[in-house]
Amino acid sequence: MSVRHPLSRLVSAFRDKFGGGNTLVKAMHPPKYRLFWRPALRALGKRKKAPIQFTFAEFLQFALYIRPTDRHWRSMAEICSPCSLSYQYILKLETFSEDLAYLAMKLNITRVISIHKRNNKKGESTTDGTRTVRPTTDHLTLDPAYLKYYLQLPPRLLANVIKKYKLDLELFGYKIPPALVNRTKI
C-alpha cells in the first residue's frame, strides 16, 4: 500500500483536477470539465460561463460534502481498509525512494527497473536517481508550499477537513502543522 499526507493529497487534487485556482478553459480539458468542473459548478451554484475558476475552499466544499467518495480525495482508510486488511508494507510518497529500496532489499530483489521519480514539488521530477534528502521527521508534516492553501481557509472548514482525514493522519503517522492546529482548536 502507498500513502501520502492527506492534506498534500487534497492540494494535489485541487491543482490537478481544478487548476489550482487558475482560470479554466472548458475546451482545453473536456474530460475534467465533464467529470469535475461541471458537477462542481452546479453543486456550488456558480455560473457555467467563462471564466471558470474555483477557490481551494470551494474545491473542499465540493470534495468533502458534495462528492466525498471520489477516489482522488477519499481517505486512504476508506479506500484501502488498513484496519481490516493486513498490509505487510506501507510506502509513503514522501519517502518513496527509500521505502522502495527497503522493499526491494526485504524481498531480495536485486534488479530494479528504472522508475520515474517525483520529488513532489509542483510536479517536478527527476529520472537520474537524485533526490533531496530531508530530515527524518520532515515527511511527517505538511510541505510548507501546501500550508498556504490551508491558512486561508475558514477555521470551521479547516476543522472539518482535519476531522475527515484524522484517521489517515493517525494511522500513517502524519502530523498537522502547529499553525493549523492553532486555527482549528483541535
Image (cartoon, helix red, strand yellow):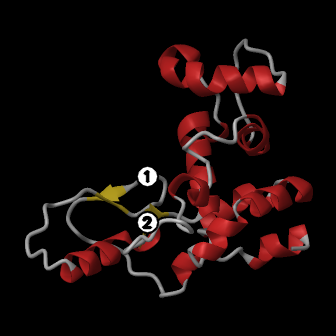
Indicate the quadrant containing the C terminus: top left, top right, bottom left or bottom right: bottom right
**Where residue 100 sits: x, y (%)?**
29, 72
Instruction: Residue 93: give its label.
Output: 2
Between the residue at mark 2 and the residue at mark 1, the CA separation in whole angstroms equals: 13 Å
Please name the residue shown 61% across and 25% down the image. 24
Which residue is identified by label 1?
Answer: 123
Above or below, 83 relative to 10: below
Above or below, 43 relative to 91: above
The amino acid pointed to by label 1 is Gly
Is residue 34 rendered to the left or right of residue 42? left
Indicate the quadrant containing the N terminus: top left, top right, bottom left or bottom right: bottom left
Please name the residue shown 74% across and 22% down the image. 41
Name the image quarter holding residue 22. top right
Please name the residue shown 56% across and 58% down the image. 76
The amino acid pointed to by label 2 is Leu
**Can residue 154 be spotted in the picture?**
no
Mark 2 vs mark 1, foreground winner is 2
Instruction: Residue 84: give its label.
Output: none
- Secondary structure under the numbered disc 1 in the rendered image: loop
**Where residue 57 sits: x, y (%)?**
79, 44
- Secondary structure under the numbered disc 2 in the rendered image: helix
Q: Residues within 10 Å of mark 1 (few under 14, many from 20)?
A: few
- Looking at the image, which residue sits at the far left? 111
Q: Residues within 10 Å of mark 2 (few under 14, many from 20)?
A: some
Q: Nearer the viewer, residue 164 or 26?
A: 164
Is residue 126 rendered to the left or right of residue 14? left
The answer to whether the residue labelled 2 contacts the one labelled 1, judged by CB atoms less than 8 Å apart, is no
Name the image quarter holding residue 89. bottom left
Q: Nearer the viewer, residue 71 or 152?
A: 71
**Where residue 166 sits: x, y (%)?**
72, 67
Name the image quarter holding residue 126. bottom left
